[in-house]
Amino acid sequence: MPPAVAPRTLSTAEDRRESVLEAAVPIFAERGLLATPTTEVAKAAGISHAYLFRLFPTKLDLAVAVVTRCHDRICEAFSEAAAEARRTGEDPRRAMGEAYFELIADRDVLLCQMHSFAAAAALPEIREASRRGFARLFALVEREAPGTSEEELGSFFATGMLKNVVTALGAADVEERWARVLAAHPAHEDSC
Amino acid sequence: MPPAVAPRTLSTAEDRRESVLEAAVPIFAERGLLATPTTEVAKAAGISHAYLFRLFPTKLDLAVAVVTRCHDRICEAFSEAAAEARRTGEDPRRAMGEAYFELIADRDVLLCQMHSFAAAAALPEIREASRRGFARLFALVEREAPGTSEEELGSFFATGMLKNVVTALGAADVEERWARVLAAHPAHEDSC
DNA sequence: TTGACAAATGACTGAGCACTCACACTCTAT
DNA sequence: ATAGAGTGTGAGTGCTCAGTCATTTGTCAA
């Protein structure tokens, strides 16, 4: 609503879109961006299938919104962790890493993100959304942890991507050497 | 072929399965394990849809075979690179990293792998196949690059997972700082 | 030749799915 | 009251797709 004319409450349609996204994230996480039926999203959001398409004209529009929402959540978690670290004098980079690990523990955000990366190659709209998300995240880390070298930034994101896979595979439940070693990484927790 | 009984040529059905897998990898790479229609796989493999289901009883069976095939390819590339490095006196770990980077350049194997990781959470059969693949790969690296510390193993695989995402997002085509920095990682190329 | 078995297919089926349309209902401003 | 805009839905429509079945074709041994 660009003009300041309306002093009234938020548009209900906008609220609906919000709650639909909230409901959609775990569903897309399960089956992926293409294989998730919109009927299930509508059911989970408690609205009719027809109305879902009034709110999001196509399934792809919905998928893009879901991916963007996931990146929003990660950015949010990083910001909060960094602010907290600044307050307590902790290392902000490490705080963000830990916040990420906590965030992906519930797997919904994690899996949406992984599905979006995998689908990015085939769907330009998803690719753009994923790139935007990564760019925002990268800028945020650089801003909140100033003085981090390019080398360290690379390691930071590499570790995050490994955590993604390790979590998606449920390595914590596997009693094998590869799972133990990779789940424990990084073990050092200081510079080299 | 475990028993030495049959001195005759390979079963033709087995050959077909091979060529179907070969054709299926790029197709699953595009749309993912769930959203790829079996009709397209059959068409690409040059067989009827009906016969596809004789060769692979369900779509999930086919998907598991495709995932396994991708891990086979990676293992193969690693083995060859390590053997070559042993011959020339190069660092085998670095050789394997480079071989991986070359392998995923064509994206088919890469994308199948990423789709499988994302789908692993929801599909137990895919999860098992992915874990098996990761386990094989890990063991291979440990065997071919003996003396590698757990820390280094973690970094090795973390870098690989970052390369996956960077490649899937086509970061090489993006003129932004995040893309440049992450695509360049790791820049050091020696121990710390 | 024939019998037997494996390879292979065309033509279905039944379910699910993205998306639409005509039609309510519910506000609020006049 | 009532018009008009926005919220919301039931009932489709036409298509796609996983999986099946009856049948044909190819191969080879006796």
Image (cartoon, coloured by chain):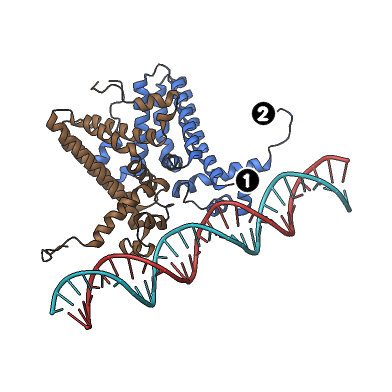
Chain colours: A brown, B blue, C cyan, D red
User: Percent x, y for residue B53?
Assistant: 61, 49
Judged left or right of residue A99, residue B101 is right
Query: First in sequence: mark 2 or mark 1?
Result: 2
User: Percent x, y for residue B160?
Assistant: 37, 32
Judged left or right of residue A125, residue B142 is right
In the image, residue B187 sits, relative to residue A129, either above or below, namely above
Name the amino acid type tagged 2: Pro
Say if residue B174 shows up in the picture.
Answer: no
In the image, residue B146 sits, relative to residue C10, either above or below, namely above
For label 2, count other residues whose C-alpha is less than 10 Å away and answer few (under 14), some (14-19) or many (20+): few
- Return the residue at label 1: B55
Residue visible at 25% across and 46% down in the picture: A72
Residue visible at 66% across and 31% down in the picture: B1
Along the line of sight, which residue is nearer the eye, A6 or A72? Answer: A6
User: Percent x, y for residue A80?
Assistant: 19, 38
- Return the residue at label 2: B2
In the image, residue A180 sits, relative to residue A122, either above or below, namely above
**Could you tell me which secondary element the residue under label 1 belongs to?**
helix
